[in-house]
C-alpha cells in the first residue's frame, strides 16, 4: 500500500503526515521508502511528532511523492515493486 505526500508548508519547515507504519528505522535513522519507477529508494526523514498512528515527518520529499505505507519494514530495495493502489488523504 502507498500514500501520496502532501506537505504542510504553513509549518516552520514543511512537514508531511504519514501513517506511522511508513516510517522505518534499521538502526541508521528514520526513513521512508519512496517509489521511483519500479524500484524504491530510502529517504532519510526526521520525525517531528507522533500522534496515534500518524507521524509528522520532514525530509527530502516533494509534494506528490509516493511512499510505501504498509509493509515498509519488509521492503527489499533490490527487488522491483508495482504500485497496485494509492490513496490520497484529502485536506481537512
Image: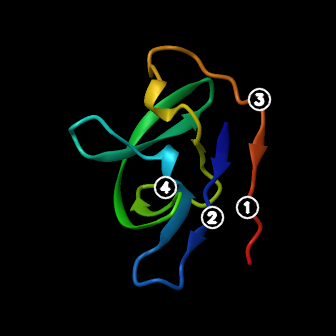
Q: In the rendered image, which quarter is residue 82 located in?
A: top right
Q: Residues within 10 Å of mark 2 (few under 14, many from 20)?
A: many
The reply to whether dot 1 and dot 3 touch (C-beta < 8 Å) is no
Distance between mark 1 and mark 4 Cα atoms: 16 Å
Badge 1 or badge 2: first in the primary sequence? 2
Badge 4 or badge 2: first in the primary sequence? 2
Query: From the viewer's perspective, is the residue at label 3 or at label 4 nearer?
Result: 3
The reply to whether dot 4 and dot 2 touch (C-beta < 8 Å) is no
Distance between mark 2 and mark 3 Cα atoms: 20 Å
Query: From the viewer's perspective, is the residue at label 1 or at label 4 nearer?
Result: 1
Tell me: residue 65, above or below residue 76. below
The image's mark for residue 84 is 3
Please state which of residues 39 and 88 is positioned toward the viewer in this rendering: 88
Q: Secondary structure at mark 3?
A: loop
The image's mark for residue 6 is 2
Seen at 62% across and 23% down, the residue is 38
Seen at 25% across and 46% down, the residue is 29
Seen at 54% across and 31% down, the residue is 71
Distance between mark 1 and mark 2 Cα atoms: 8 Å
Image quarter where the C terminus lies is bottom right
The reply to whether dot 1 and dot 2 touch (C-beta < 8 Å) is yes
Location of mark 4 (residue): 61
Amino acid at each position: 500500500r502507498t500514500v501520496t505526500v502532501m506537505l504542510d508548508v504553513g509549518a516552520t519547515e514543511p512537514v508531511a503526515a504519514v501513517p506511522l507504519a511508513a516510517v522505518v528505522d534499521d538502526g541508521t535513522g528514520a526513513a521512508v521508502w519512496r517509489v521511483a519507477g519500479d524500484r524504491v529508494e530510502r529517504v532519510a526523514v526526521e520525525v517531528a511528532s507522533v500522534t496515534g498512528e500518524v507521524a509528522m515527518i520532514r525530509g527530502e520529499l516533494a509534494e506528490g511523492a509516493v511512499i510505501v505505507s504498509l509493509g515498509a519494514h519488509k521492503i527489499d530495495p533490490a527487488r522491483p515493486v508495482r504500485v497496485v493502489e494509492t490513496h490520497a488523504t484529502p485536506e481537512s
